[in-house]
């Protein structure tokens, strides 16, 4: 599997924010994007996830033989943005269960995923009862309940305490070892020894 | 998709205090009219179809803009949009869930409300029927309107400007059909068929427009 | 003073101990006694009602009165009890006041519905319509809406402790409807042509109707208080279960304690 | 406080569709009744004050739940609540802003809608006058209702259900004042004064209740 | 000036989350609260800011002579929560200007405050155009536009890039030197040498 981003340019409000970015990631590789606030990290990630139309360039996913995957790339991606994509009225379990069923390709059971982020005991609490960091950890558990070969993560560890960051690093490593492709934007050290590093200048 | 349907239904049942609230809202709207118009039974029964339809419209409007706004704010919309499911289908399901929670209970409760408004048996039947056929159209049109508005900074304005004028014909066909059912001189089949056509038409076009809007107005 | 101490210390932590405990003891003893009294009164009331003379105007349908009128009274009394409980919640923040309010609401709604339904049933033979938008019927309908609104409001909150204040304030506000139900017939007339309203202004009842009615009213009241204590008991238990569940769910988070404090 | 007033007005004009929503809903209500009644101009003009009042009442409900919900979600409410200003005053200003955007335009548009409904000049004057005096009361009561539901994720319909029974007196006095203005036999001054009293009363009590609610429902 | 928190207990959903906390901070002192996700840091801060009723204990503010300040403590506090308290539809300038006028006790002008967080060039952009970190920096600028002797900050640097964290540290130091009292919850190093440190255990 190979993710190819070629000459990607993204515009916002008619102005180019990210211009002419290109890289190639093979299975098991990770790319960490760093850069100042407002330098376009989130914009770039949204472009890759298909959430923002490309002004030019392309994002492609192909298998080892170079045969492109069927359908748009976004269908193979997990995207974790600044928001957690959870409903405050539903319980933690119901939230994850919904995404598990809606996204398809089920992977871990909800309980197992919660166990991974060490929040199994909160399964039956309404989501809005959780603290900021616990909410983020539930959002990370969403990546585990369905199976996607590409993870696109925007400041995944914001609000996490030190032990949770370590847990997260472990999850990401396991994902990479299983052949996944990771792209993450961050200001903090994720503890991943990324094979690639991209620095944006404002 | 079933997951989405049940989630959306659960969410609106949950957070609005159950389907009870919807019915209660209608009851409250209906009981306001006699205060304004006077306790004149004959007059009330003439106005009953309009009252019920206005209640339905209002109930649909009250929740419409939140159809996507909340999904957008909490980031769910991004994930909904990224999936393999055809986006128009996702939109259709969201509209359906909205209707099941706000529209259907009203249709089912029409007999009770009809009696209170002194509506004849035939009038009740006609009102319930047109509401059953017509309210989904409001939901579908509303979905498109809500989708247009979701990404735009000043979306609220657009929602009402777009949705209300489109919905007024639905109201008018519905009420004309009821009048047709109750009076010899007025036509019945024509407005009802129009209403059916509008609903079928919007059930395709509404979700499709919503999907296109969401894809193209990504930010 | 720059203190921000809460008015009382027992917002909700203490309540699960002393007070509700004593209440539960009381409830367990009171319910059988009151239940028996209620059934006996009801039997007596029904017996008297069926032996009441036929009304020359209304025939047998007057029987409905013995069901209808006490139900209407209870609908108003229950709301009054809720309003008093609401004061308890607002002023003293006593959790049992909230329990009382919330357990009374469904009962009040049922009595109100009963009054509406029997009134409506009575209306058909008397006036020829099931429903009439006259002062009393409409205001009782609004009472029903208020009851149901309060129930919906209290259900909408996840946490009973959070619902207490909003529900209490809404209950107090809604109390306006009680005098309206009682006296509004005249106000309404200033608005609209008097249609069938006059029927309500009957002269004082004769004794053969009054006694069965009063006994029935007493029976209704006994039923209400029995059910109220029972539902309160349920509510207390439900809250205990809820808090036990919550605690279990939080086994390794929750309690925060001061670990250390050092000077740097 | 002026800052809050201008901010709230600007915000709802910008993003809630503000005045246009209400006016369009008004239009929907008004265009529906002729179809229910049939082409009876006399009846329509008799009903016109009632229709206008109901329209205004229901239109005021449309935006109510957004009065606090957005402030809560983006954290502004916390900061608003912490300030030296009496909280009740803050609530009063929010209610006022809401009325200026949703209520006042309806009053100003009454002449146009009145003409559409075949209302006499005097009727238009009376309706606009009572609406001018009465609609603020709806906003003040609504503010209290919105504060009750502020913690609920989607309080929309619930707020309307809670508020509707409370605004009925406003409606009654408004309508009876109009009747007084149009008919010889009916009193005019008494209901109008009542209406003023209700508005003044709620302008104090509504914001006060809202303030108490917000203080006690902190989380 | 002296902030005294005495035996403060806070409940959520009827259960004590923070119990019996007490400390004293003099003018110019800073307290940093750390602890795992869900250990009650945000809860404690909301209690101090008067946004959550105290189940027991007290929070007091007094001058050097021990005379308590008039009015509730919350009126002397700036609170920066997980949310930014800005309206997405208004421009950055209008947002700050609103708070400046509404909060009273004006301090820096809006432009000066924006200059401090290095965002003057965004003054006329609608708030929702900003990137996550820029938004947070505008929220920090809110602390500067009006004058309050106590700052209560909940993870103030979440989403900030390294230079912005340094800027923030500078602002906080200047605030402490001018005699302010600071209470902050964080997982990251704020660069402040806090005189007090409170660690919560879950
Ligand atoms: C749904 C319709 C009705 C409602 C909501 C209703 C409501 C009430 C209420 C609230 C009361 C208690 C009034 C008080 O204590 O002052 C009452 C009493 C009474 N109602 Fe009704 N009513 C309805 C229909 C009727 C009908 C159809 C009749 C008979 C023709 C009737 C006859 C009476 C009588 C005789 C009393 C006792 C009045 C008294 O206290 O002396 N009601 N009703
Ligand atoms: N509304 C609520 N009702 C009940 N419990 C709640 C509520 N809000 C938070 N909690 C619980 O209170 C505890 C403390 O939450 P708090 O937000 O104070 O944690 P925190 O220390 O700020 O964590 P983080 O580092 O993740 O921000 C958590 O276990 C949470 O589940
Ligand atoms: N909707 C929009 N319209 C116009 N410009 C925008 C829009 N959204 C963001 N921008 C601009 O795009 C630039 C990049 O934003 P982006 O969110 O990608 O930054 P980032 O690198 O993720 O920053 P951070 O570290 O703060 O998250 C910013 O300067 C921002 O002002
Ligand atoms: Mg970003
Ligand atoms: Mg926190």
Image: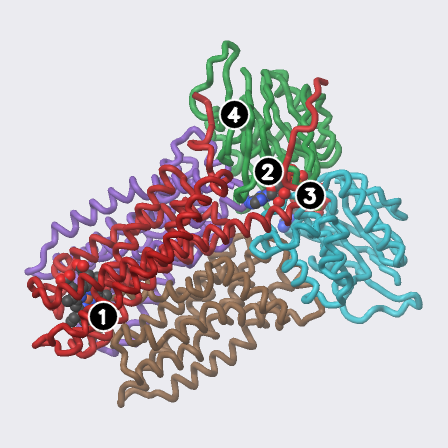
Chain colours: A cyan, B brown, C red, D purple, E green
Q: Secondary structure at mark 2?
A: strand
Residue depicted at x 78% and y 63%: A107
How far across and how far down the image is residue E16, in percent? 57, 38
Residue D58, visible in the rendered structure? no
Marks 2 & 4 on one chain: yes
Of the image marks 2 and 4, the number of the one nearer the N terminus:
2
Between the residue at mark 2 and the residue at mark 3, the CA separation in whole angstroms equals 12 Å
B121 is higher (above) or lower (below) than E118: below
The chain that hosts pointer 1 is C
**Residue underneath mark 4:** E59
Residue of label 1: C46
> Quarter of the image containing the N terminus of chain C?
top left
What chain does badge 2 belong to?
Answer: E
Give the distance between the C-alpha atoms of the residues marked 3 and 1, in whole angstroms.
59 Å
Q: Position of residue C233 (x, y in %)?
A: 44, 53
Front in this rendered view, residue D154 or D43:
D154
Q: Point out the image quarter for the C terminus of chain C.
A: top right
- As rendered, which of D206 and C43 lies closer to the eye? C43
Residue corresponding to mark 3 = C252
| Distance from mark 2 CB to nearest ligand 2 atom below 8 Å | yes
Q: For the view shown, which residue lies furthest in the right direction?
A: A65
Label 3 crowd (10 A; few <14 / some 14-19 / many >=20): some
Give how far apart the Cα atoms at labels 2 and 4 are.
Answer: 17 Å
Tag shown at residue E17: 2
């Amino acid at each position: 599997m190979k993710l190819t981003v070629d000459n990607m340019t993204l515009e916002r409000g008619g102005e180019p924010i990210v211009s002419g970015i290109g890289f190639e990631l093979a299975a098991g590789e990770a790319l960490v994007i760093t850069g100042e606030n407002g330098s376009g990290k989130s914009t770039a990630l949204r472009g890759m996830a298909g959430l923002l139309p490309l002004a030019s360039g392309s994002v492609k996913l192909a298998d080892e033989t170079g045969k492109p995957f069927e359908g748009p790339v976004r269908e193979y991606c997990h995207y974790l943005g600044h928001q957690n994509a959870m409903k405050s009225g539903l319980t933690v379990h119901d939230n994850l269960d919904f995404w598990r069923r809606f996204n398809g390709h089920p992977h871990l059971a909800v309980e197992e995923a919660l166990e991974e982020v060490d929040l199994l005991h909160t399964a039956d609490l309404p989501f809005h009862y959780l603290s900021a960091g616990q909410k983020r950890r539930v959002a990370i558990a969403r990546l585990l309940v369905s199976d996607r070969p590409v993870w696109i993560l925007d400041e995944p560890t914001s609000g996490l305490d030190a032990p949770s960051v370590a847990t997260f690093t472990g999850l990401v490593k396991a994902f990479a070892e299983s052949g996944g492709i990771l792209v993450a934007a961050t200001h903090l050290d994720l503890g991943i020894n990324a094979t690639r590093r991209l620095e944006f200048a404002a | 998709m079933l997951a989405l349907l049940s989630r959306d239904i659960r969410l609106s049942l949950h957070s609005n205090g159950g389907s009870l609230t919807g019915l209660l809202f209608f009851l409250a709207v209906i009981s306001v009219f006699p205060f304004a118009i006077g306790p004149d039974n004959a007059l009330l029964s003439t106005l009953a179809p309009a009252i019920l339809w206005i209640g339905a419209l209002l109930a649909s409007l009250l929740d419409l803009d939140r159809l996507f706004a909340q999904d957008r704010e909490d980031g769910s919309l991004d994930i909904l949009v990224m999936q393999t499911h055809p986006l128009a289908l996702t939109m259709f399901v969201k509209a359906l869930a909205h209707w099941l929670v706000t529209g259907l209970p009203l249709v089912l409760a029409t007999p009770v409300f009809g009696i209170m408004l002194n509506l004849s048996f035939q009038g009740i039947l006609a009102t319930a029927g047109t509401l059953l056929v017509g309210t989904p159209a409001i939901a579908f049109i509303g979905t498109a309107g809500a989708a247009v508005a979701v990404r735009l900074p000043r979306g609220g304005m657009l929602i009402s400007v777009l949705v209300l004028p489109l919905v007024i014909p639905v109201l008018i066909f519905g009420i004309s059909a009821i009048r047709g059912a109750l009076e010899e001189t007025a036509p019945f089949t024509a407005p009802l068929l129009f209403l059916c056509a509008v609903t079928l038409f919007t059930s395709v076009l509404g979700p499709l427009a919503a999907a296109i809007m969401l894809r193209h107005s990504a930010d | 003073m720059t203190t921000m101490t809460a008015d009382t210390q027992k917002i909700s932590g203490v309540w699960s101990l002393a007070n509700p405990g004593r209440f539960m003891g009381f409830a367990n003893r009171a319910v059988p006694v009151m239940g028996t009294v209620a059934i006996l009164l009801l039997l007596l009331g029904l017996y008297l009602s069926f032996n009441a003379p036929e009304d020359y105007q209304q025939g047998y349908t007057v029987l409905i009165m013995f069901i209808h009128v006490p139900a209407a009274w209870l609908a108003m009394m229950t709301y009054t009890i809720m309003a008093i409980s609401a004061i308890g919640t607002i002023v003293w923040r006593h959790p049992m006041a909230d329990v009382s309010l919330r357990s009374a609401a469904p009962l009040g709604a049922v009595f109100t519905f009963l009054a509406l339904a029997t009134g409506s049933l009575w209306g058909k033979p008397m006036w020829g319509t099931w429903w009439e938008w006259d002062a009393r019927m409409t205001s009782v309908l609004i009472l029903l809406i208020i009851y149901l609104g309060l129930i919906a409001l209290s259900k909408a909150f996840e946490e009973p402790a959070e619902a207490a204040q909003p529900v209490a304030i809404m209950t107090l506000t809604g109390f306006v409807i009680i005098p309206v139900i009682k006296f509004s017939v005249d106000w309404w007339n200033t608005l609209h042509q008097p249609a069938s309203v006059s029927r309500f202004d009957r002269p004082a009842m004769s004794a053969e109707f009054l006694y069965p009615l009063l006994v029935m009213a007493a029976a209704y009241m006994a039923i209400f208080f029995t059910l109220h204590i029972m539902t309160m008991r349920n509510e207390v238990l439900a809250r205990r279960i809820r808090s036990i569940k919550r605690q279990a769910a939080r086994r390794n988070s929750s309690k925060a304690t001061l670990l250390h404090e050092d000077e740097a």
